[in-house]
Image (cartoon, rainbow, N blue to C red):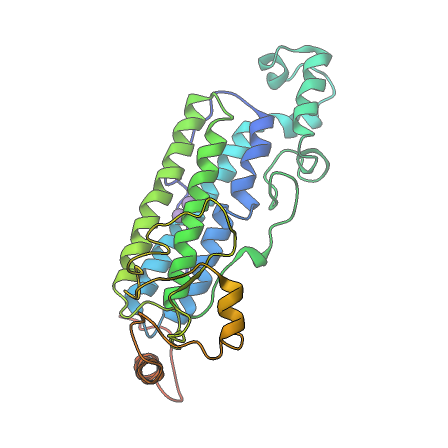
Amino acid sequence: MFYHAKELQFNARVSKPDPKFASLLLEQFGGMNGELKAAMQYFTQAFAARQPFPEKYDMLMDIATEEFSHLEIVGATIQMLMNGVNGEMKDISEQSELMQLVGGGKASKENLIHESMLNPMFLGVTGGSPAVTNSQGVPWSGYYVDANGDMTVDLRSDIAAESRAKITYEYLMQFTDDPDVKETLKFLMTREVAHHQMFEAALSTLEPNFPPGVVQGDPRYTNLYFNMSKGDDARGPWNEGESPLLGEQWQYIDDPQQVVNSTDGLRDQQPQGAAMSMDEAEKKSKEVSKMRSEQIKSAVPKGSNQWSKYTK
Ligand code: MN
Ligand code: MN
């Protein structure tokens, strides 16, 4: 169950209204890399983790709930940046507090409305409060949520999500001069840095965690690098020496067309510098599949099941 505390996780403040920035900040409310996406992603992933990986469930729910707290901070900041707009729209006297703050007069009101119009949702639909859209007014979508029912896949999606949330805050910070708003954004950005490390650490506790899922790659193809774009060819740890996760020797194919032709379209390709033979890979797929399947089945009771334990 959820329990709501009315105090924000971070003491969000604004120095003055700024409808233009409020409009941009909506990106982190209902945008594809925003707080609602993060919250819903970790919340959704947590269901599959609940019984087989209770410690990952605990972490996912802690972070999902923190993301809802960030959503609340972003919404509160938008509301404060739009402060007065809702009242203004109900006030035809041109004498409101907000009008005095922005200089007063009809020109100011028009200017304010013009700035708010960057996102017409603010005027036409919500009257100055947050909308569940991105900064362009595109509605939030469940399609932003990545949950694949495999802990290693989900954690990698989460690391990517945290990177995108972090850079979005970094970009947004350049568009406000308000020191109070900057402090809030710095806090929100930094928490994504913290979450990024939590997901990395959690991934490292799952063994094996690569390749994702249970089926091993075909050793004929896991370490081939095709030089598909000729000229100024670069070499580095992505195509020479040892591959980082499987520890195989990269095979650099300088003439892909020749190799494809001479191997009957790679069907006759033999494993070279691979970690395993094809038989070993087959065996490992079965082993990992048995292990993962047992891990999950043993954690989930057959027949009658109950989600929670209650203590009196
Ligand atoms: Mn966040
Ligand atoms: Mn985060």
Q: Quadrant of residue 45?
A: bottom left
From the top left corner, tell me how far across and down residue 250 is, in percent.
34, 62
Q: Quadrant of residue 62?
A: bottom left
Q: From the viewer's perspective, is residue 255 above or below residue 266?
A: above
Q: How many marks?
A: 0
Location of the C terminus by quadrant is: bottom left
In this rendered view, identify the residue nearer to me: 238 or 298.
238
Describe residue 217's horizontal placement relative to residue 135 as left or right: left
Q: From the viewer's perspective, is residue 139 above or below residue 55?
A: above
From the top left corner, tell me how far across and down residue 246 is, in percent.
30, 66
From the top left corner, tell me how far across and down residue 36 is, in percent.
50, 50
Q: Quadrant of residue 191?
A: top left
From the top left corner, tell me how far across and down residue 209 is, in percent.
32, 67
Asked if one can make out residue 150 in the rendered structure from this viewpoint, the answer is yes
Location of the N terminus by quadrant is: bottom left
Q: From the viewer's perspective, is residue 115 above or below residue 204?
A: above
Q: From the viewer's perspective, is residue 281 above or below residue 258?
A: below
Q: Residue furthest bottom?
A: 303
Describe residue 152's horizontal placement relative to residue 205 as left or right: right
Describe residue 116's horizontal placement relative to residue 196 as left or right: right
Asked if one can make out residue 3 in the rendered structure from this viewpoint, the answer is no
In this rendered view, identify the residue nearer to me: 177 or 10.
177
Give the residue at x 47% y 56%: 227
